[in-house]
Image (spheres, rainbow, N blue to C red):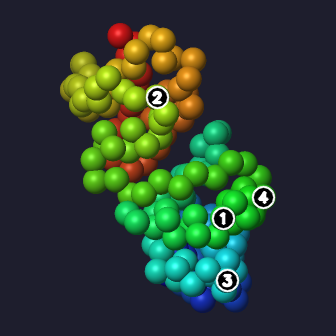
Amino acid sequence: MKLTLDRMCITTNDLCLTCSKKIKTGEAGQLDIEIGKVIIHAAKQNKELNSITLNKIIVTRKGAYLIINPGDKAKFEKSGAVLMNTLSDAVGNDVFLIEMPTKVSKLVEDLISPVEPVRTSTVFIPPFGEKEIKVQIKKEDKPNLPMTQDVLSSITKELFGMNAHYAYV
Ligand SMILES: [Zn+2]
């Protein structure tokens, strides 16, 4: 099991220099400790959780996104709804599992499911030619989008360094 902070540091509440630094720089926070504790505890029952990797926790207004490794989602699901509910309680908001995507288009698909984008592309925004992700959505799907552009953008920015916007077609 690899978490956003050392397993030992989370369990003992006694942070080593590396973990303390992560907290100090804002790379991790109290939430990383709370979520880590829940997963470590659940792993006593569900041994499969011992092989998960939690890469990052992204907090948005919509909830906390746990960025895990490909294949890890099924390991969490072995614990059933209990684990997800306990995680939500620890966060005080909804919790979503996202397997680390290699492509930004796959990330967008996962995040806005069940809405399917018509097309996801990278565009250059004038005047400085900054890259941004353009997500084309059918007009009729607009009410079904599970997250606002701001929330989507904060996640793509965190993982791929690019903002995202919706374009309705
Ligand atoms: Zn540590």
Q: Is residue 56 above or below residue 4?
A: above
Residue 32 in the image: state x and y as whole percent.
Answer: 62, 67
- Mark 4 neighbour density, 10 Å: few (under 14) some (14–19) many (20 or more): some
Which tag is nearer the camera, tag 1 or tag 4?
1
Q: Point out the tag, 1 or 4, that comes first from the N-terminus.
A: 1
Q: Which residue is mark 3?
A: 45
Q: Point out the tag, 2 or 3, that comes first from the N-terminus.
A: 3
Q: Quadrant of residue 39?
A: bottom right
Q: CA distance from mark 2 to mark 1?
A: 25 Å
Q: CA distance from mark 1 to mark 4?
A: 15 Å
Who is closer to the viewer here, 17 or 132?
132
Q: Amino acid at mark 3?
A: Gln
Q: Point out the tag, 3 or 4, that comes first from the N-terminus.
A: 3
Residue 29 in the image: state x and y as whole percent.
Answer: 63, 64
- Mark 2 neighbour density, 10 Å: few (under 14) some (14–19) many (20 or more): some
Can residue 157 be seen by looking at this rendering? Answer: no
